[in-house]
Amino acid sequence: MKIAIVGATGMVGEIMLKVLAERNFPITELIPVASEKSVGKTISYKGVDYTIKSMEEAVKMRPQIALFSAGGTISLEWAPKFAAVGTTVIDNSSAWRMNPEIKLIVPEINASSLTADDKIIANPNCSTTQLVMALAPLHKQYSIRRVIVSTYQSITGTGVKAVRQLENEYKNESGEMVYAYPIHRNAIPHCDVFEDNGYTKEEMKLVNETKKILNDQNIALTATAVRIPVVGGHSEAVNIEFENDFDLAELRRILHDTAGVVVQDNTDTNTYPMPLYAEGKNDVFVGRIRRDESLKNTINMWIVADNLRKGAATNTIQIAEYLIENKLV
Ligand code: 2RA
């Protein structure tokens, strides 16, 4: 498989290369792509150095698959150009996610909707992916009426500049501020930019992307997205009201039996998911599962995942694996 990694020098791009190697993805030719300032430099994959190409060069090489993590502007301009030469693009930006012509895919939930005609495929926002991994099997069994989600998001979701800001603040050194406020010893209720309705883009991604992936516009969902000084992954406190009642043991079993979901839930042993331990893993971890005693047919849970892996790189690569396994590329 001739595969291009667009944004190969970014945080997600680097994790993509790591996950491709871990999963022994069938690569016959690797085309790392990055901005002009990186063209000509090299990246290492499985002990072999590969020269970084420009977008123009990479399109001419006609990769079968291109994994994008280079921002919406680049994706809007270049994904169609790759698709025009027959490349299947899997994009991590928000550029295509809500386009009605473009599929928004979490393989465990809706990869079966993919066809060979899908030449641009959208990877959901990281905080959406881990949420729907837990919601999807429960929606199927109990029909979700309403979801309230509060996120506690890793600074790696913002990128390397945020990691540098936190490191500077640890050391009490000045440096570039990517957030409006210090993130060390703080919690910032502001992920991405504010919309006219008072919610942030991050919060509206959770609302809109979840409904698209679950294919149910009747689900009521509201979100608060918060940035915290953590690097291992995103955490989410989730309250789910179902149309129907449920048996708690059965609900746990459904989550336990869901591919890609790991239930970590035992108050006797202080067992629950935490980003410190989710970092570097590809699963979505669920715990603190308990009835909401204030409302019938309602459950609380805590969901944690490495936002750079299942939230981005791993989900993207799983989509590519599905395409290959089902001969759609
Ligand atoms: C964030 N989900 O965490 C967004 C983009 N990665 O900032």
Image (cartoon, helix red, strand yellow):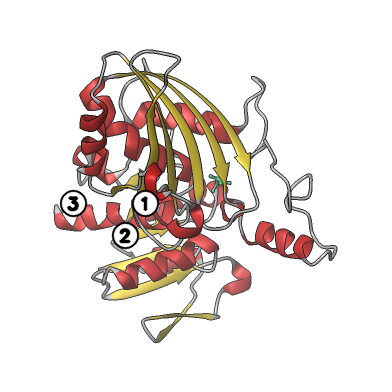
Of residues 140 and 18, the one drawn nearer to the viewer in this rendering: 140
Q: Residue at x 48, y 72 (%)?
A: 53
Local secondary structure at mark 1: strand
Give the distance between the C-alpha atoms of the residues marked 3 and 1, in whole angstroms: 13 Å
227 in relation to 280, above or below? above
The label number, if any, that marks residue 65 in the structure image: 2
Which residue type carries mark 1? Ile
- Residue 35 in view: yes
Q: Amino acid at mark 2?
A: Ile
Q: Are marks 3 and 1 in contact (CB under 8 Å)?
A: no
Q: Quadrant of residue 295?
A: top left
Query: Split into 4 quadrants, where in the image is the N terminus?
Result: bottom left
Q: Residue furthest left?
A: 326
The image quadrant that residue 37 belongs to is bottom right
User: Which of the 4 quarters of the picture holds residue 87?
Assistant: bottom left
What residue did someone put label 3 on? 328
Using a 10 Å C-alpha cutoff, classify the residue at mark 3 as few (fewer than 14 neighbours), some (14 to 19) or many (20 or more): some
> Residue at horizontal 21%, vertical 25%?
141
Front-most of 86 and 246?
246
Distance CA(mark 2)–CA(mark 3): 11 Å
* Vertical position of residue 214 compared to residue 227: above or below: above
The label on residue 90 is 1
Residue 199: x and y in percent read 62, 26
